[in-house]
Image (tube, rainbow, N blue to C red):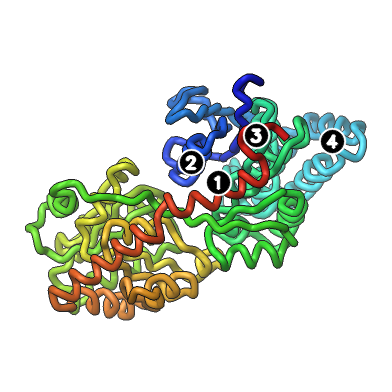
């Protein structure tokens, strides 16, 4: 990455997304560049070529690697059409057994999936023939623990091998989340150097991963234990997740780097962006949810809360994108919404705080259905404080410590996120504050962000970690 003359220590980060909008990855990379490191990000590419395979920003190089192809179609044949895949399966299984112990896990997965697939296909055939159909309909996409585990084996680990091969030699390899950690491990094993695991969340306890059978998650958990235990340091986002990682995986040094935005000065009229976009007059109370439209975020309960009688006249804005977008748009267009629910597309991260500042309340009623949700401190929490917008949040320990128990005073309200009545009560408690108290509350949010919860403060911990692992000015 750098010549011997410059002697800048180098860091390669791995992330299993395209790195175009991942603010944490980009902030960490640019902070390390500012501290004197040469930084490259190996990210996920796409066959469509919508983004270039190589580009740079703020002194950071991005290398995008397309994941291996064909595995999904072959897996569909193995799992759901074994009569079509029998020759390919036999050749693949025998070939992997011949490789010795390294190939045996893949062989067992293929053989086991085929054997379990045969009765599944027979059952489906009888079922559809009994219903008067002549051809069984084959299901595409994830089905059970087999599908999830095979995706790990062939897609995630396959991409990891390609990404490690595309990465230049470096002094340190930094894996963002569990699905990119194996690429960092493989690159470290290939070139030698330091290994850092950046766990943005409890990956196996988040979203769809948390709903996989326990046996499948234990298999991947064993890999995480081995990889994380071999890291020189683990970076994560809050104390609760750090404690959980230490308890599960006996990791060594852990560093908390919260994903706060940089200090922000509101531009003129920034607070008018949101009211203007939804066509309401200045002073109309607005509740904002910004981020991914994902399950477990409590978006339906938030809508139910805002549409209650005690919040009549309050408008709710969903700002973002995700699989729940169509449902939210249908709700917004319904008679039930009374024109008080609005769905807006995501905005550029550099412009986001201006939009957030136009809301009276920033709501984040994550449902406590997974351990990760109960421990989470989402980006939107810190973005809301930076914008000076009071928060209504799920009542979880990490969030309560910030929103209710901060030394400067409360920064919003907490609620039972499973109960629309509790959410509505928390929102109403902020909207009903006298004008001077509301101004003071917004000023407290901004002051906490300016003095403590900002990237300038948080990034120092990352830079101090790297100064210990790979000091600038010399190569280890």
Give 11 or 15, whichever is nearer the viewer.
11
* Quarter of the figure with the C terminus: top right
| Depth order, front residue of 329/177 | 177
Pick whichever of labels 4 and 1 is earlier in the sequence: 4
- Binning the other alpha carbons within 10 Å of mark 1 as few (below 14), some (14 to 19) or many (20 upward) gives many
User: What residue does disc 4 label?
Assistant: 93
The CA distance from mark 4 to mark 2 is: 47 Å
Position above or below: 240 against 310: above
Q: Identify the image quadrant of the N terminus.
A: top right
Q: Which residue is mark 3?
A: 159
Ranked by sequence position, the earlier of labels 3 and 4 is: 4
Judging from the image, what secondary structure is the residue with disc 4 in? helix
Residue 24 screen position, x and y as percent: 47, 46
Q: Residue at x 60, y 29 (%)?
A: 8
- Between the residue at mark 2 and the residue at mark 3, the CA separation in whole angstroms equals 27 Å
**Number of the front mark, 4 or 1:** 1
* SS of the residue under disc 2: helix
Residue at image position (16%, 66%) is 285
State the SS at label 1: helix
Q: Position of residue 234 (x, y in %)?
A: 65, 53
Q: In the rendered view, does 242 fall on the left or right side of 103? A: left
Q: In whole angstroms, how far apart are the C-alphas of marks 1 and 2? A: 8 Å
Q: Check whether the beta carbons of the residues at disc 1 and disc 2 lie within 8 A of each other.
A: yes
Disc 3/disc 4 C-alpha distance (Å): 21 Å
User: Mark 2 or 3 closer to N-term?
Assistant: 2
Query: At x 23% / y 56%, what residue is drawn?
Result: 357
Return the residue at label 2.
31
Residue at the spot of label 1: 463
Is residue 333 at all visible to an observer of this figure?
A: yes
**Could you tell whether 425 is left or right of 431 in the image?**
right
Q: Quadrant of residue 366?
A: bottom left
């Amino acid at each position: 990455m750098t010549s011997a003359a410059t002697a800048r220590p180098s860091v390669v980060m791995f992330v299993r997304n395209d790195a175009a909008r991942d603010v944490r990855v980009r902030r960490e990379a640019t902070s390390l560049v500012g501290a004197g490191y040469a930084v490259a990000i190996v990210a996920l590419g796409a066959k469509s070529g919508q983004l270039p395979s190589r580009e740079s920003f703020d002194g950071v190089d991005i290398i995008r690697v397309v994941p291996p192809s064909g595995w999904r179609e072959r897996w569909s044949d193995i799992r759901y059409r074994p009569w079509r895949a029998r020759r390919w399966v036999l050749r693949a299984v025998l070939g992997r057994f011949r490789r010795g112990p390294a190939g045996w896990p893949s062989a067992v997965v293929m053989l086991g999936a085929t054997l379990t697939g045969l009765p599944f296909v027979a059952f489906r055939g009888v079922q559809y023939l009994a219903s008067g159909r002549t051809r069984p309909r084959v299901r595409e996409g994830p089905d059970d623990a087999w599908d999830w585990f095979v995706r790990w084996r062939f897609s995630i680990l396959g991409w990891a091998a390609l990404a490690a091969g595309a990465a230049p030699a470096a002094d340190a390899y930094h894996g963002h989340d569990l699905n990119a950690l194996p690429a960092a491990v493989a690159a470290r094993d290939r070139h030698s150097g330091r290994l850092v695991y950046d766990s943005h969340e409890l990956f196996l306890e988040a979203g769809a991963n948390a709903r996989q059978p326990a046996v499948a998650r234990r298999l991947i958990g064993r890999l995480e234990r081995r990889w994380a235990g071999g890291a020189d340091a683990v970076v994560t986002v809050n104390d609760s997740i750090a404690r959980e990682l230490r308890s599960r995986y006996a990791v060594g040094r852990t560093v908390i780097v919260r994903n706060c935005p940089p200090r922000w000065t509101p531009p003129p009229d920034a607070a008018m962006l949101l009211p203007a976009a939804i066509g309401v007059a200045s002073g109309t109370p607005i509740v904002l949810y910004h981020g991914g439209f994902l399950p477990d975020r409590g978006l339906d309960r938030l809508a139910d809360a805002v549409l209650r009688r005690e919040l009549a006249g309050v408008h709710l804005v969903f700002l973002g994108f995700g699989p729940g977008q169509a449902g939210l748009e249908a709700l917004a267009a319904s008679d039930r919404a009374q024109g008080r629910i609005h769905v807006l597309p995501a905005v550029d991260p550099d412009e986001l705080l201006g939009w957030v500042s136009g809301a009276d309340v920033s709501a984040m009623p994550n449902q406590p259905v997974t351990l990760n949700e109960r421990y989470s401190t989402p980006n939107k929490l810190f973005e809301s404080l930076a914008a000076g917008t009071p928060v209504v949040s799920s009542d979880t320990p990490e969030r309560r410590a910030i929103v209710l128990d901060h030394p400067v005073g409360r920064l919003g309200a907490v609620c039972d996120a499973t109960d629309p009545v509790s959410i509505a009560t928390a929102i109403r408690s902020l909207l009903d504050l006298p004008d001077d108290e509301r101004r003071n509350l917004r000023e407290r949010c901004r002051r906490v962000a300016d003095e403590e919860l900002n990237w300038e403060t948080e990034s120092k911990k990352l830079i101090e970690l790297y100064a210990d692992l790979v000091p600038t000015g010399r190569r280890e």
